[in-house]
């Protein structure tokens, strides 16, 4: 069992906690100042605390607070070089965290799907150990990337679920417009995204080949694809990703300038 602490049990921290709980490989301590946040994860952890120093008693400490709180939490957190500190904050560099702890620092950009064991994560840093890889494997898929790629990874897989939720909503709304019950439309749209994603991950065909496979000659899909190919839908998705990437870089620049003050 890996002793793991999660500091900050909001949207992302609680998703990681629930994902880790499902694996059965972790003894988890949840730490948050908000009693309601602790209450919401109490069924998935071994211990809850509002005291950061209690959360320090772990092999792996995941700091899952908002970026602007990371510095304050690190000030309170005394760790040794034998421990691993995982930082998941958007725009907060490995250097920023390393300068404030003695622990091995690993920077990860996770996503909300950790909760169901379907997380896509980017990880960076020299201290990525097999234990960290195992943890990431436990809750989904991961890619090891250079630190300079963390802004784009943040946009693609960190913010990405929101973009996909938006697309699911658009497809479900079209279903409702066509007469499906709202619940059915949402289930059909969401399951279609899930199935399509699984197909991409498992098939040995390219995305283009898979589109071809759905488009029967003189059939229905090609009519819809013609609309998409004639639209700016791909450019709009790319613009959303770029906007998120730029914001991540902006946050990183703010933290760098704080470091140099
Ligand atoms: N949301 C997402 O999908 C993703 C988020 N991230 C990163 O995860 C981090 C957390 O984001 P998110 O979960 O959305 O944020 P939330 O605000 O939902 O969660 C943060 C939690 O930390 C608590 N907190 C604040 N100060 C402390 C402290 N000193 N000690 C312990 N707990 C504290 C907050 O309590 P209170 O509300 O009372 O302040 C809150 O419960 C961010 O750095 C973000 O960049 C990364 C990938 C995806
Ligand atoms: O929106 C954010 O800043 C965080 C980081 C990636 C997803 N949510």
Image (cartoon, rainbow, N blue to C red):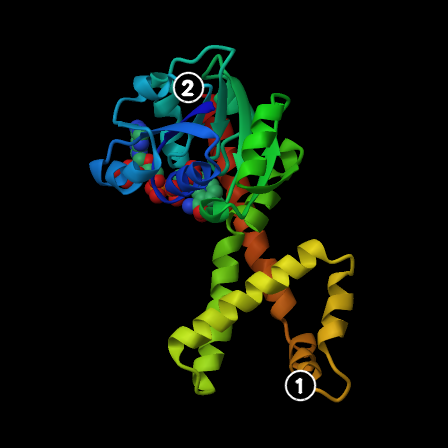
10 Å neighbourhood of mark 2: few (<14), some, or many (≥20)? many
Q: Residue 223 location in percent, x, y?
A: 68, 85
Label 1 and label 2: CA atoms lie apart by 55 Å
Give the crowd class for mark 1: few <14, some 14-19, many >=20 residues within 10 Å.
few
- Which numbered disc covers residue 58? 2
| Nearer to the camera, 74 or 197 | 197
Q: For the residue labelled by badge 1, is the local secondary structure a helix, a strand or a loop? A: loop
Give whichever of discs 1 and 2 has the lower sequence position.
2
> Are circles 1 and 2 on residues that touch, CB within 8 Å?
no
The residue under the point 43% across, 76% down is: 184
User: Horizontal and vertical percent for residue 60?
Assistant: 47, 23
- At 26% across and 36% down in the image, what residue appears? 38
Q: Position of residue 146 (x, y in %)?
A: 67, 33
Disc 1 target residue: 220
- SS at mark 2 in the image: loop
Residue 192 rendering spot, x and y as whole percentages: 56, 68
Asked if one can make out residue 187 in the rendered structure from this viewpoint, the answer is yes
Q: Residue at x 60, y 34 (%)?
A: 123
């Amino acid at each position: 069992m890996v002793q793991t602490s999660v500091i900050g049990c909001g949207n992302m921290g609680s998703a990681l906690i629930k994902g880790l709980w499902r694996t059965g490989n972790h003894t988890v301590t949840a730490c948050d100042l908000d009693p309601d946040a602790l209450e919401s994860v109490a069924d998935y952890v071994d211990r809850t605390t509002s005291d950061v120093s209690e959360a320090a008693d772990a092999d792996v400490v995941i700091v899952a607070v908002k970026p602007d709180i990371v510095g304050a939490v690190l000030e309170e957190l005394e760790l040794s070089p034998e421990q691993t500190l995982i930082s998941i904050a958007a725009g907060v560099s490995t250097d920023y965290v390393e300068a404030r702890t003695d622990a091995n620092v690993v920077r990860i950009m996770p996503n909300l799907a950790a909760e169901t064991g379907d997380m896509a994560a980017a990880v960076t840093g020299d201290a990525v150990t097999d234990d960290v890889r195992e943890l990431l494997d436990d809750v989904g898929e991961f890619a090891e990337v250079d630190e300079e790629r963390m802004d784009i990874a943040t946009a693609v897989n960190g913010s990405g679920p929101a973009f996909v939720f938006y697309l699911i909503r658009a497809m479900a709304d079209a279903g409702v417009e066509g007469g499906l019950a709202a619940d059915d439309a949402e289930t059909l749209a969401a399951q279609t995204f899930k199935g399509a994603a699984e197909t991409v991950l498992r098939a040995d065909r390219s995305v283009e080949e898979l589109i071809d496979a759905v488009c029967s000659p003189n059939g229905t899909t090609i009519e819809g694809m013609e609309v998409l190919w004639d639209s700016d839908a791909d450019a709009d998705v790319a613009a959303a990703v770029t906007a998120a990437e730029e914001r991540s870089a902006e946050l990183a620049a703010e933290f760098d300038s704080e470091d140099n003050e």
